[in-house]
């Protein structure tokens, strides 16, 4: 057992396998699978993960492991297996999957240098680049005209080499402590010996006679209003010692949370939680879909189920969408479980995140609350996994590995034989369909816990506003209601629904939107050729001058930014104090919290924001929710646009009237008759589900079929089209007769950073070999990928169809 199988940190498909290394004598005792090591790879030293052991290797002349980075494995055996599955399931590299499961600081950082290794003259450009130096940092390449292929040629010619310097970014925070160096008896004697003039020294010794335990140096200095030199003097006398100790950065002050106890459950809640408690008790796996209207007490169910898990000595993972990981949410878990909770949040610093992760790794907590990647928390006795707001798109990672947290959670739930709870007021059609088929177990909460009705939703037809001569973004009804609420000292939340890109064209007079006759998807406006295109099937037509439905010439592009709305709003209601919350105002760490606190403290009358305000917020004084443009998401070129609109409108309506004051919702739209807007205003999930399922069936979209999306990009337009074409042609004959490939079509955002993007979409019911087939075909382009800067990305569960 002295050979380790290692996955090395080289993100290339040709390297996507284990490599054998000899374990030197000195590491034999300590090395275990799941640890990170430094190994020689070609001319350089890189990081890798030990995944297995073996006695013999098929290869000769194995190299030795240089160094071991961890003392305990950072990946448990279960996570190693999960990583392997994740890579194969998402068609990613093993190394990429492992890296995705760990905090950023554990990913070794390499400094890349270009080194000149021969005296032969280089090309003029390269000579200028090296400018007499032997080695140059890789980053300098960015600001020059030296091309990547030039560098590659020089490397092939043996003139230069790339050198990697491994730097570990692990940072631990150390704090100085002091404690007595001798026994209390001796301290007492020393106390007598110290001259009375050294008053502070005497005080400190006196303190240590009563408190022989360690104390933080800074605290001691503060306590006695003294200085470092007093401490040093005592240290010189051999009476006390100072030492450094590692401490965790706890971004949350655990004492600051008001502690709560379990509430008496309502009948509905009790019925919903009972089977979950049974599964916890019996170590049984199942997926539960908890469908509960906003304010129905889903979170209380999570808390009480977790309590059972804790009592059993097991652990819990709670996933919440990034943007709803607000202080309000954290409070509810910390309030119930105190310092037994770690929070993994992307707004924490790398160091803070690493510390929270280590509290999990060392089993110092039993509960993790976090965003998507918290699903990989290194617990070994999981008793429950909860995904709150399961319909949220942020559970899908949009770069490699392109996984959905739901799939990883269910896989772990099977491994640990524990229940997985998917909670939402507006479940995805996929999940709800599975619950109807009995694949998931359904639990329903139909009432709000306070028995209050859902707020009334008022739909305002913006076409009528236009016809009445009001060209602004605010209907008369909305303006009046805002005025009224502000006068009463109440608050309003305004949602500017602006997701993705406003690429569709709409008639402002009649609300008409051009759709593809074959796909039931809004056509995308391509400015370059002034064409409307369907990015699912390639159908196209010229951009019309007049509305085909009412002949108005007010047919145009749709969309406005939050900043412009803010200006308009301040003009319209000058006395209102407005807080704007969007990506621009929340980029800085803590700014999200700050804005919410200001609003909670009533320092503003109106909170204006993008969809990030729709989630989980709970303010007593909010009695009005306004949706400025319900349509902007409805016509995205995405078959889920109606579903997303329904979800968002339902969520945002749930923000009003959660407490004593009754709430009201005003939705502005150009298409009031659209079923997703109408049914959201009636809070009728079932009717929406039925209608949307019919459309999915008719046009063959999930959950009736599965999708895979292949996107190809290249600087050269023709190369991008041709490569996509080749992929389609290679794949077609290999698919089942009821599968289809749509495309090649330009991606809705056809050019990004000077690269042309084309895509094809596979719709299928049953293709057990699809991953293998796609892998094989993509591999045929390996050379173009490596040398010719072609990019091919495969998404086996596409959500962002842009
Ligand atoms: N059994 C109960 N008795 C009394 N109050 C309760 C009970 N369960 C929950 N609540 C309270 O009801 C309110 C709404 O509950 P909660 O936030 O858990 O609902 P939710 O379904 O998670 O809502 P949302 O989906 O809108 O986030 C909270 O203030 C909560 O403290
Ligand atoms: Zn029209
Ligand atoms: Zn089409």
Image (cartoon, rainbow, N blue to C red):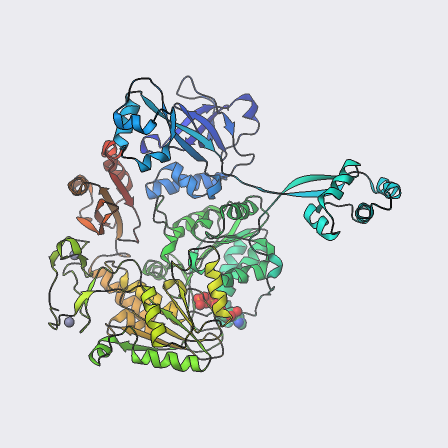
Q: Using the rendered image of the protein, determine whether residue 458 is visible from the camera's viewpoint.
A: yes
Q: Which one is in front, 485 or 643?
A: 485
Q: Left or right of 477: which side holds 169? A: right
Instruction: Give residue 207's position: percent from left, percent from top.
Output: 80, 49
Instruction: Give residue 163's position: percent from left, percent from top.
Output: 39, 27
Residue at (50, 34) in percent of width and height: 35
Q: Using the rendered image of the protein, determine whether residue 678 is visible from the camera's viewpoint.
A: no
Q: Which quarter of the picture shows residue 772?
A: top left
Q: Left or right of 345: which side holds 117? A: left
Q: Left or right of 485: which side holds 221? A: right
User: From the viewer's perspective, is residue 441 above or below residue 226?
Assistant: below
Q: Which quarter of the picture shows residue 86?
A: top left
User: From the viewer's perspective, is residue 287 above or below residue 477?
Assistant: above
Instruction: Give residue 362's position: percent from left, percent from top.
Output: 58, 44
Quarter of the render that holds ligand 2: bottom left
Instruction: Give residue 403's position: percent from left, percent from top.
Output: 36, 47
**Number of numbered discs on residues:** 0
Q: Which quarter of the picture shows residue 674?
A: bottom left
Q: Left or right of 510: which side holds 203? A: right
User: From the viewer's perspective, is residue 776 above or below residue 489?
Assistant: above
Residue at (58, 46) in percent of width and height: 363
Residue at (45, 27) in percent of width and height: 39
Q: Which one is in front, 23 or 230?
A: 230
């Amino acid at each position: 057992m002295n050979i380790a199988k290692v996955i090395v940190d080289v993100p290339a498909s040709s390297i996507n396998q284990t490599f054998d290394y000899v374990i030197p004598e000195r590491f034999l005792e300590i090395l275990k699978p799941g640890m990170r090591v430094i190994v020689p790879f070609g001319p350089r030293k890189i990081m890798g993960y030990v995944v297995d052991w073996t006695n013999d290797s098929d290869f000769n002349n194995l190299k030795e492991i240089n160094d071991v980075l961890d003392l305990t494995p950072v990946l448990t055996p279960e996570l190693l297996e999960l990583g392997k599955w994740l890579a194969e399931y998402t068609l990613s590299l093993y190394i990429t999957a492992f890296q995705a499961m760990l905090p950023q600081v554990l990913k070794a950082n390499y400094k890349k240098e270009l080194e000149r290794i021969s005296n032969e003259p280089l090309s003029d450009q390269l000579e200028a680049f090296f400018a007499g130096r032997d080695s140059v940092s890789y980053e300098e390449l960015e600001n020059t005209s030296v091309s990547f292929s030039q560098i590659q040629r020089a490397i092939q010619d043996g003139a230069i080499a790339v050198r990697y310097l491994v730097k570990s970014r692990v940072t631990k925070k150390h704090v100085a402590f002091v404690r007595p160096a001798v026994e209390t008896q001796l301290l007492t004697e020393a106390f007598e010996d110290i001259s009375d003039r050294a008053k502070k020294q005497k005080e400190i010794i006196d303190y240590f006679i009563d408190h022989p335990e360690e104390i933080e140096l800074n605290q001691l200095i503060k306590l006695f209003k003294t200085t470092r030199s007093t401490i040093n003097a005592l240290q010189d006398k051999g009476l006390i010692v100072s030492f450094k100790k590692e401490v965790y950065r706890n971004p949350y002050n655990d004492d600051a949370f008001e502690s709560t106890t379990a509430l008496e459950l309502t009948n509905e809640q009790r019925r919903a939680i009972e089977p979950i408690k049974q599964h916890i008790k019996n170590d049984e796996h199942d997926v539960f879909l908890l469908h509960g209207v906003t304010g129905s007490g889903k979170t209380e169910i999570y808390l009480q189920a977790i309590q059972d898990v804790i009592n059993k000595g097991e652990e819990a993972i709670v996933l919440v969408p990034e943007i709803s990981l607000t202080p309000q949410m954290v409070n509810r878990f910390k309030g119930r479980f105190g310092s037994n909770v770690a929070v993994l949040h992307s707004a924490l610093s790398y160091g803070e995140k690493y510390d929270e992760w280590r509290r999990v790794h060392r089993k110092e907590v039993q509960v993790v609350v976090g965003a998507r990647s918290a699903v990989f928390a290194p617990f070994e006795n999981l008793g429950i996994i909860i995904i709150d707001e399961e319909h949220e798109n942020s559970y899908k990672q949009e770069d490699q590995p392109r996984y959905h947290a739901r799939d990883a959670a269910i896989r772990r739930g099977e491994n640990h034989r524990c229940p997985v709870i998917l909670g939402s007021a507006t479940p995805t059609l996929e999940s709800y369909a599975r619950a109807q088929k009995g694949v998931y177990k359904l639990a329903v909460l139909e009432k709000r816990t306070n028995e209050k009705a859902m707020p009334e939703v008022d739909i305002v037809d913006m076409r009528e506003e236009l016809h009445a001569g009001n060209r602004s973004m605010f209907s008369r009804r909305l303006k009046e209601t805002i005025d009224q609420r502000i006068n009463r000292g109440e608050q309003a939340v305004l949602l500017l629904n602006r997701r993705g890109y406003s690429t569709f064209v709409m008639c402002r007079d009649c609300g008409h939107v051009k759709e593809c006759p074959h796909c039931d998807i809004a056509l995308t406006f391509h400015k370059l050729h002034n064409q409307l295109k369907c990015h699912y099937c390639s159908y196209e037509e010229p951009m019309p001058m007049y509305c085909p439905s009412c002949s108005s010439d007010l047919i145009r592009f749709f969309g406005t930014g939050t900043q412009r709305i803010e200006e308009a709003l301040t003009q319209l209601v000058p006395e209102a104090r407005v807080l704007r919350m969007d990506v621009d105002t929340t980029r800085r760490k803590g700014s999200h919290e700050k804005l919410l606190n200001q609003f909670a403290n009533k320092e503003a009358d109106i909170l204006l924001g993008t969809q990030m305000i729709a989630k989980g917020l709970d303010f007593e004084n909010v009695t009005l929710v306004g949706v400025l443009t319900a349509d902007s998401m409805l016509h995205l070129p995405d078959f889920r646009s109606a579903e997303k609109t329904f979800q968002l409108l339902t969520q945002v309506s749930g923000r009003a009237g959660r407490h004593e004051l009754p709430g009201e919702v005003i939705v502005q739209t150009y298409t009031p008759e659209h079923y997703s807007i109408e049914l959201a205003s009636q809070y009728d999930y079932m009717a929406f589900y039925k209608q949307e399922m019919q459309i999915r069936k008719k046009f063959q979209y999930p959950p009736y079929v599965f999708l895979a999306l292949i996107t190809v990009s290249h600087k050269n337009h023709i190369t991008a089209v041709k490569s996509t074409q080749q992929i389609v042609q290679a794949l077609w004959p290999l698919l089942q007769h009821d599968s289809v490939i749509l495309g090649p079509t330009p991606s809705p955002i056809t050019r990004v950073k000077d690269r042309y993007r084309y895509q094809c979409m596979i719709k299928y019911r049953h293709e057990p070999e699809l991953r293998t087939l796609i892998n094989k075909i993509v591999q045929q382009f390996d050379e173009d990928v490596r040398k010719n800067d072609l990019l091919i990305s495969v998404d086996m569960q596409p959500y962002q169809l842009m």
